[in-house]
C-alpha cells in the first residue's frame, strides 16, 4: 500500500537497519510503501552486501547495505497545526483572539447593564497546539566490521624433512661444477659454462643461477648424464623463493628438470619434494582475494601454455635447424614445468610424458 508524501516527516535510516512495518520512501520520492519482509544477501566474506525489501503491495526493492534511505516517522499523523502567529480559537478571526468579552459589562463598562450578573454560559477557552512530535533522527546503527580472515601460513623455505630426501653435495658448489666438466671434457657447451662458474658461484646473481640451470639441462638433455645433471640442479633446488621472479625462473626450471629425472629413476618421494618446492610461491600470498585471483591466472597459464608452435614451424619452413633446436629447448622447459605441476586441465600427465619424449628425441638428434 502506498501513501502520499505531502506534509510527512522522514528520517534517514541505514538500509541494514530496516525492519518489517517501516514505511519506506520509494525511489520516485513521491510515494511510500510498507515493508513486508527484509532479506539480507552476504558477500563472499560473510558481510552484508545487499538488502532486499519485499513490499506489502508487491515488488522487491534492492538496496546496498551501506546506503541511507528515508523512512516515515512512526509518530507522524500526516497533519499538524501551524506555529505561525498567536494562539487562536478555531473558527475565530485572528483579530478577535484574546479580546473576546466574557460579559456585557466587559463590552460597555459604563452601562447599567454592566452591574448585571455575569453570564453563566461556558467560557471560551484558548486551544493551544499540541507539542510537536520529536522528529530527531535516530542514531544510525554502528557499522559491523567483519573479522579478518585467517591468513594461510607463509612459506619460508624447505623444511628439514624435505631436505633430508635430497643428497648433500659432495664438496663445494665449485667442486660439483668441476666434476661435471671433468666428466665431459669434449663438450664445448659444458666447458664454456663451467669456465664461467669456476670463478665463483653467487646464488644472489641471476646470471649465475641461469648458468647453473643451463648446465644442468645441457648435461641431461644433450649428454644424457642424469647423475651430474641432478647434482648441479641440486645446487639450485635447495634455494628458497625470495620474491624475485627473475632469479626464481632459473630455480624453477632446475626443479622441473630434477623432478622429471627422479620420476624416470623411480624416486617418486624425491620428485615430490622438488614439485613441492616448485609450487611453494603459489601459497605465499596472504590476502585471500589476491590468492584466488592468482590461482585463476595460474590455472589459465597451465591450461594454455606457450609451446612455441609458431616459432618452431617458422624455423622449419626456413630450414633453420639451429633456431628450431633453440625453440624446441624452450618448449621442453615448458613441458617439464607442466609435468612438475602434474599436468593441467587440457594436457594430462601421460600426454606430457609422450610430448617430452618426442622433444628429447628431436633435440638430441
Image (spheres, rainbow, N blue to C red):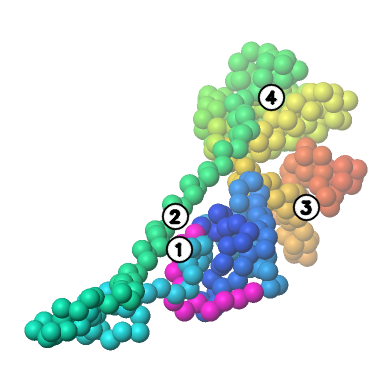
How many residues crowd mark 3 within 10 Å: few (<14), some (14–19), many (20+)?
A: some
Question: Viewer-proximal residue, 254 or 283?
Answer: 283
Quadrant including the N terminus: bottom right
- First of labels 1, 2 by sequence position: 1
Front position in the image: 350 or 208: 350
Q: Secondary structure at mark 4?
A: helix
Quadrant assignment, res 282: top right
Up/down of 174 relative to 123, above or below: above
Residue at mark 4 to residue at mark 1: CA–CA distance:
71 Å
Q: CA distance from mark 2 to mark 3?
A: 56 Å
Q: Is residue 316 left or right of residue 153?
A: right
Residue depicted at 48% across the width and 73% down the height: 78
The residue drawn where x is 49% and y is 49% is 141
Q: Is residue 115 left or right of residue 70?
A: left
Q: List the residue tagged with mark 1.
A: 11
User: Which region of the structure is painted magenta?
Assistant: 1-13
Distance from Cα at disc 1 to Cα at disc 2: 8 Å
Q: Residue furthest top?
A: 171
What residue is drawn where x is 57% and y is 67%?
23
**Eye-nearest disc, 1 or 3:** 1
Note whether residue 271 is visible.
yes
Residue to which mark 3 is pinned: 303
Amino acid at each position: 500500500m502506498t501513501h502520499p508524501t505531502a506534509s510527512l516527516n522522514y528520517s534517514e535510516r541505514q538500509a541494514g537497519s530496516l525492519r518489517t512495518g517501516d514505511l519506506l520512501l520509494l525511489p520516485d520520492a513521491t510515494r511510500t510503501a510498507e515493508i513486508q519482509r527484509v532479506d539480507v544477501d552476504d558477500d563472499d566474506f560473510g558481510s552484508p552486501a545487499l538488502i532486499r525489501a519485499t513490499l506489502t503491495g508487491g515488488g522487491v526493492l534492492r538496496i546496498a547495505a551501506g546506503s541511507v534511505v528515508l523512512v516515515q516517522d512512526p509518530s507522524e499523523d500526516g497533519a499538524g497545526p501551524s506555529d505561525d502567529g498567536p494562539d487562536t480559537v478555531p473558527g475565530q478571526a485572528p483579530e478577535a483572539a484574546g479580546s473576546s468579552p466574557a460579559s456585557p459589562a466587559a463590552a460597555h463598562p459604563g452601562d447599567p447593564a454592566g452591574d448585571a450578573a455575569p453570564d453563566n454560559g461556558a467560557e471560551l477557552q484558548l486551544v493551544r497546539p499540541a507539542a510537536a512530535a520529536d522528529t530527531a533522527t535516530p542514531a544510525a546503527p554502528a557499522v559491523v566490521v567483519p573479522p579478518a580472515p585467517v591468513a594461510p601460513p607463509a612459506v619460508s623455505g624447505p623444511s628439514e624433512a624435505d631436505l633430508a630426501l635430497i643428497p648433500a653435495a659432495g664438496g663445494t658448489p665449485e667442486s660439483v661444477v668441476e666434476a661435471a666438466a671433468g666428466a665431459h671434457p669434449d663438450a664445448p657447451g659444458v666447458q664454456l659454462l663451467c669456465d664461467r662458474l669456476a670463478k665463483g658461484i653467487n646464488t644472489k646473481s641471476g646470471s649465475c643461477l641461469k648458468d647453473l640451470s643451463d648446465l644442468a639441462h645441457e648435461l641431461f638433455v644433450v649428454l644424457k648424464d642424469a647423475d651430474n645433471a641432478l647434482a648441479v640442479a641440486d645446487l639450485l633446488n635447495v634455494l628458497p623463493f625470495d620474491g624475485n621472479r627473475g632469479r626464481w625462473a632459473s630455480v624453477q626450471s632446475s626443479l622441473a628438470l630434477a623432478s622429471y629425472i627422479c620420476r624416470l629413476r623411480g624416486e617418486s618421494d624425491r620428485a615430490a619434494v622438488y614439485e613441492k618446492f616448485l609450487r611453494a610461491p603459489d601459497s605465499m600470498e596472504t590476502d585471500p582475494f589476491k590468492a584466488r585471483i592468482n590461482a585463476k591466472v595460474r590455472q589459465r597459464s597451465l591450461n594454455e601454455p606457450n609451446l612455441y608452435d609458431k616459432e618452431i614451424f617458422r624455423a622449419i619452413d626456413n630450414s633453420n635447424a639451429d633456431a628450431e633446436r633453440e625453440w624446441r629447448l624452450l618448449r621442453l622447459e615448458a613441458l617439464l614445468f607442466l609435468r612438475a605441476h602434474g599436468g593441467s586441465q587440457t594436457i594430462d600427465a601421460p600426454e606430457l610424458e609422450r610430448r617430452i619424449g618426442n622433444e628429447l628425441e628431436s633435440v638430441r638428434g
